[in-house]
Image (spheres, rainbow, N blue to C red):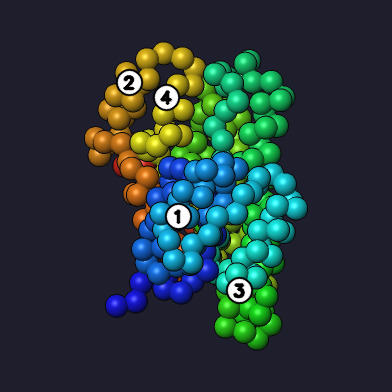
Amino acid sequence: MAGRVEGKIAIVTGGGTGIGRATAQRLAAEGAIVTITDVNVDKGQAVATELGGAAAFVQQDVRVEADWQRLMDDVARRHGRPDILHNNAGILSTSPQQWLADTDMAQWRAIQAVNVEGVFLGCKYGVAAMSVGGRAKGGAGGGAIVNMSSVAGLVGTPGAIAYGASKGAVRQMTKSVAIDCAKKGLGIRCNSVHPGIIRTEMGNAVMDLGGGDPDRKWAASIRNVPMGEEGQAVDVANCVLFLASDEARHVTGAELVVDGGLTAI
């Protein structure tokens, strides 16, 4: 039986750890040919080696436009036109504090550069690469872009003000890209995923932000989740897989929240 994304060419940025790694695993398990990118060579290469087959690793800094062009050229040379792009790479903070008064312009700009500009460049170069031989040119192409946002892009995050602002920008950007592609008849869908309390390296970093006992902060955060437990990376990866697959063929400009009911209260 064919996988849900059998034979599709997929790119996962920030694929060396956490949700990115889990997404690369799920896409590969469902038949995709996955290219993992990361700034960390050891972690990114380890995931590509783990996946085996035609999986590949490309070192990339998502802030650098030339890296995006190099990535798309590499994927085209190895496999052809990409079908799936998961803009997952992101950072939480460059400082232990991110309250309004504690956030300087250096931290603000560093977070926006990765989380907003990186996603913008991904969408720009992803759409261009997916459009080669695509529907607007009479082909049968198209594609799916899944951007990583957060529940921090939906509700106020006073202790992570720069991060929350960046994820709100990703949410809005996703909708704009979706409509742009739809109006041009490109057959490219663009959606965002919004994780809540997820047990990953990033989740641990969230609990470290602002000081205090991280174990107590985990416990307090989980008590706020109606389903009574934190999510796992694979829970988010499964949602990315759905949005990347043809099962979501009529879904674009949408936001899929993966938070155990946290933002429904």
Residue 24 appears at what percent x and percent y? 44, 56
Residue 186 appears at what percent x and percent y? 63, 74
- Asked whether the viewer can see residue 263, the reply is no
Which residue is more in the foreground, 246 or 70? Answer: 70
- On screen, 262 above or below 217? below
Which residue is more in the foreground, 254 or 8? Answer: 8
As drawn, the label of residue 76 is: none
As drawn, the label of residue 80 is: 3
Residue positioned 43% across, 42% down in the render: 18
Which of the two labelled residues, at mark 2 and mark 1, occupies the earlier sequence position?
1
* 213 relative position to 119: left or right: left
Is there a contact, CB below 8 Å, between mark 2 and mark 3? no
- Give the CA separation, mark 4 to mark 3: 41 Å
Which residue type carries mark 2?
Asp
Is there a contact, CB below 8 Å, between mark 4 and mark 2? no
Query: Callout 4: few (<14), some (14-19), or many (20+) C-alpha neighbours within 10 Å?
Result: some
Which of the two labelled residues, at mark 1 and mark 4, occupies the earlier sequence position?
1
Where does label 2 land, which residue? 215
Which of the two labelled residues, at mark 4 and mark 2, occupies the earlier sequence position?
4
Residue positioned 62% across, 16% down in the render: 102
Quadrant occupied by the N terminus: bottom left
Q: How many labels sit on residues?
A: 4
Which of the two labelled residues, at mark 3 and mark 1, occupies the earlier sequence position?
1
Residue 217 appears at what percent x and percent y? 36, 21
Q: In front of the other: label 2 or label 1?
A: 1
Secondary element at tag 3: loop
